[in-house]
Image (spheres, helix red, strand yellow):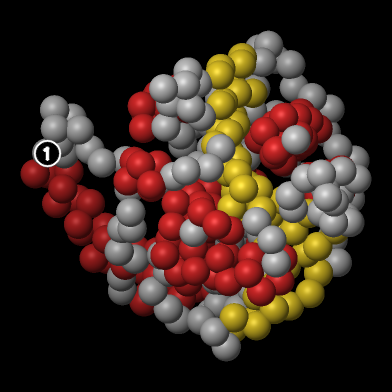
Amino acid sequence: MAIAMLKNQPKGAIAPHAPTVPTMPGDYWQWQGHSIYYVKAGESRRDSPPLLLIHGFGASTDHWRKNIHELQRDFEVWAIDLLGFGRSAKPDLTYSGQLWRDQLHAFIQEKIGKPVVIAGNSLGGYASLCVAADYPEAVAGVILLNSAGPFTPVADAPKPSPFQQAIAETIRTVMLQPVPSWLLFQYLRQPRTIRKTLEKVYVDRSAITDQLVADIRRPASDPGAVQVFAAVFKSPQGDTVDSLLQRLTVPLYLIWGEGDPWMKARQRSALFRQYYPQAQEVFVQAGHCPHDEVPQQVNALMREWVRGVMG
């Protein structure tokens, strides 16, 4: 069993931000009758696989613009809006890791045409892991940035009290109703609320620009956006992360924003290494979205890893 490589970045060593860049031009691809938005940049290279970038919940290809802007110099780079997000269609469906897994696998086969290194943040990390675990022939490597997804609870873990379970069930029941979910969605899509949420999960608040807030808010005005939001509360839980890792056969690189209040990076790191000890990982001084908060640092890490593993 290989030992995971662990590198610690110096505290406070936040890399300069990549220059502000305009929206990257994109195109649409049809999948199962739905319009899917994607961006392509850079040229195909014989010495490295393409990169496919997957955004997190509520984000889009725009969240990767700083990365695409720089990485296109060295790689063929693709980014895609998951069904239900960004500029992609927002049909009234049951959303799940399996749905996005199948979307991404079809995209790799039909549009890219060769195995990719797939990189995902948060929800996009979970979707990326689903693709790599179930379609290894389509994936040359996986990069997860503060990846979401549940692990199987351990037997001796403390269980919620009956009161906590009742509260959780009540909240879920209420949010399945159209009016409460609509009201919450209207509150969350306000620029002030978006900014306050970002301030909680970014270590360096100077990275929270008007452009970033606008990028996140824009898709919330699309037809079907509120239905997609409500669908989150009724989506079935998919495969656990540990079950996916037990099926994984390709190289895995974990980039952790250590200041993320939503993910206990050190604890999740230990779980990932428990089930996939050959993984390589690095911790950076950032929050939930390190690729956007410290893009130059993350771009360098991704470039170095891809060249080292795939070279």
Label 1: which residue? 161
| Residue 68 relative to residue 118: left or right | right
**In-front residue for pair 205/257:** 257
> Which residue is painted at 65% across and 22% down in the image?
285
Q: Is residue 17 above or below residue 131?
A: above
* Image-quadrant location for residue 200: top right
Residue type for callout 1: Ser
| Residue 309 relative to residue 152: left or right | right
The answer to whether residue 206 shows anywhere in this view is no
Q: Residue 181 location in percent, x, y?
A: 40, 68
Residue that extends furthest to the top in the rendered view of this protein? 10
Could you tell me which secondary element the residue under label 1 belongs to? loop
> Which residue is painted at 45% across and 81% down in the image?
92
> Which residue is painted at 59% across and 53% down in the image?
139
For the N terminus, which image quadrant?
top left
Q: Residue 256 location in percent, x, y?
A: 57, 30
